[in-house]
Amino acid sequence: MAGPRIVAAGTDNVEELVRLNARLILEETGIRDPHTETSCPVKHGRKHFLGPLSRNDAVCLLVL
């Protein structure tokens, strides 16, 4: 079994980044603070990640 791979994310990885971010928010913040808006990544995550992923001077790393 191969270990995790770190890759530079591209626009084709946006859905995976949003999914991972939503799970992180839910696990880290949603459990501790019931008033946290845990649906924010699903509502706004696509736009949030597409910005940096579309730039030439930024990199987003994704562990697969």
Image: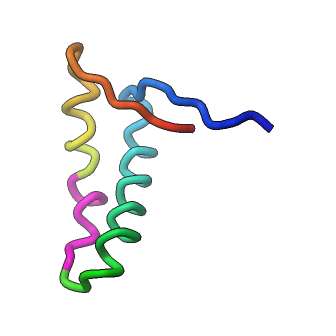
The correct choice, above or below, for 31 with respect to 8 in the image is below
- Magenta stretch: includes residue 10: no
Closer-to-camera residue (38/44): 38
Q: Position of residue 53 (x, y in %)?
A: 28, 27
Relative to residue 55, is residue 21 drawn left or right?
A: right
Q: Quadrant of the C terminus?
A: top right
The correct choice, above or below, for 32 with respect to 15 in the image is below
Relative to residue 17, is residue 37 drawn left or right?
A: left
Please report the residue visible at 32 percent of the width from the left and 64 percent of the height from the top.
25
Q: Position of residue 32 (x, y in %)?
A: 30, 81
Please report the residue visible at 39 percent of the width from the left and 26 percent of the height from the top.
10
Residue range (magenta): 36-44
Q: Quadrant of residue 33?
A: bottom left
Please report the residue visible at 20 percent of the width from the left and 73 percent of the height from the top.
37
Residue furthest to the top in view is 56
Q: Position of residue 5 (x, y in %)?
A: 59, 31
Q: Position of residue 36 (x, y in %)?
A: 20, 76
Relative to residue 56, is residue 60 drawn left or right?
A: right
Q: How many marks?
A: 0
Residue furthest to the right in view is 1
Closer-to-camera residue (43/31): 31
Q: Quadrant of the N terminus?
A: top right
Please report the residue visible at 36 percent of the width from the left and 60 percent of the height from the top.
22
